[in-house]
Amino acid sequence: MARKKTTISVIKADIGSCPGHVVVHPHLEDVACGFMQEAKDDGLINDFRVTHCGDDLELIMSHRRGVDSEDIHKLAWKTFEEGTKHAKSLKLYGAGQDLLIDAFSGNIKGMGPGVAELEFTERPAEPIVVFMMDKTEPGAFNLPVFRMFGDPFSTAGLVIDPSMHAGFMFEIWDIMEHKKVMMKSPEELYDILALIGAKSRFVIKRIFPKKGKLPPKEAVAAVSTEKLAHIAGEYVGKDDPVAVVRAQSGLPALGEVLEPFAFPHLVSGWMRGSHNGPLMPVSLTDAKCTRFDGPPRVLALGFQVNDATLVGPVDLFDDPAFDPTREKAAEIADYMRRHGPFEPHRLPLSEMEYTTLPKVLSKLSSRFGAME
């Protein structure tokens, strides 16, 4: 009998933080651990880790039920609902803000929380990295994920590992038009870049192998693409995406998966979801946003997957090798903040329609007259 596939589900939500938008209260993590442990004891999941990135509660689960499992998504929803009750009792800020729908309807997607899931056949050694971001949008993963799987200047294996020469398939979503396209790298490299460079509209959802050691229908990377403003129709906070990436043996090595984050590229979000700023790779200890509610952060936890259990985590950005990146991010944050309310620090008007700015413009509309 063939062994069942393993599924890694990372589901996150902002259900309350302390103080303001800074960090998840430890009590909420304790509540979530209780729910996860009960689910493990009942055999619903095989293993779990509960953590946070800034004000987002992060559930990392391993199980055998595949992606989009109603049981797994319902477990996450119930966990967030119960956590919200405790957040309200503690008068935490933004209690339940990512729970945009009143009742669970079979799948947590489109209800507010972010979801990234991979189902795969375990290799003899199965390293994965779970990335978690705070104070930014799903498109913040476009540049680093592209560099992992499409840029030979970042991932040397694309040049020197024959098993990677065929490249990868990129699944790209148009989150404005609710459409998707599958594109091949390196054959369609420039077309891929033409899309994903517009990171507020086109986002990388999944990466698939084309040829080699791995089954071509099993994704090797997945990113959450929930855009909260598009669901709620107004500003409800940042999207704070998560991602799961497999590494080694026909895939980018672990160091190649991390290397793109050595460049603190500009992402959208930061204060009130309305500003551009540098993405700073940080340890779990520093995964809390304070300066101008930022700057945006990314956390990376590494695991070995062993028969659907999680060995780890290792806090991968807790490394002095990333200190120069953090220093550069702080310098860029200084530079961007000097712009105050001016673009390009503040997002362009086309990206501000879901914020509170339209209310300001509406108040002034009657005072505008024709130009001479």
Image: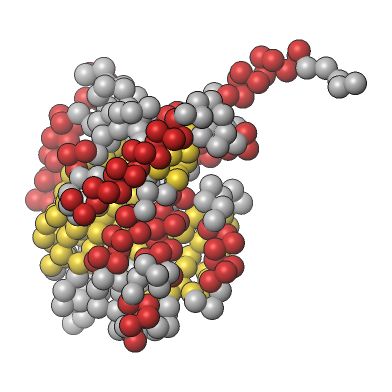
The total number of labels drawn is 0
Query: In percent of the image, x 42 and y 78: which residue is there?
Result: 167
Query: Where the N terminus falls, by quadrant?
Result: bottom left
When the figure is inspected, residue 113 is found, relative to residue 188, above or below; the finding is above
179 and 102: which is toward the camera: 179
Q: How is the image coloured?
A: secondary structure
Q: Is residue 308 left or right of residue 258?
A: left
94 and 337: which is toward the camera: 337
Residue 198 percent coordinates (x, y) = 56, 52
Residue 139 percent coordinates (x, y) = 47, 50
Q: Can residue 101 be seen in this view?
A: no
327 and 235: which is toward the camera: 327
Q: Is residue 344 visible?
A: yes
When the figure is inspected, residue 19 is found, relative to residue 247, above or below; the finding is above
Q: Quadrant of residue 126?
A: bottom left
Query: In percent of the image, x 86 and y 22: which residue is there?
Result: 371
Query: Residue reaching furthest right?
Result: 372
Residue 20 percent coordinates (x, y) = 31, 22
Query: In percent of the image, x 14 and y 59: which residue is there?
Result: 310
Query: Where the C terminus falls, by quadrant?
Result: top right
Residue 136 percent coordinates (x, y) = 41, 41
74 and 309: which is toward the camera: 309
Q: In which quarter of the image is residue 309?
A: bottom left
When the figure is inspected, residue 79 is found, relative to residue 6, above or below; the finding is above
Q: In which quarter of the image is residue 352?
A: top right
Query: In percent of the image, x 13 and y 67: which residue is there?
Result: 306
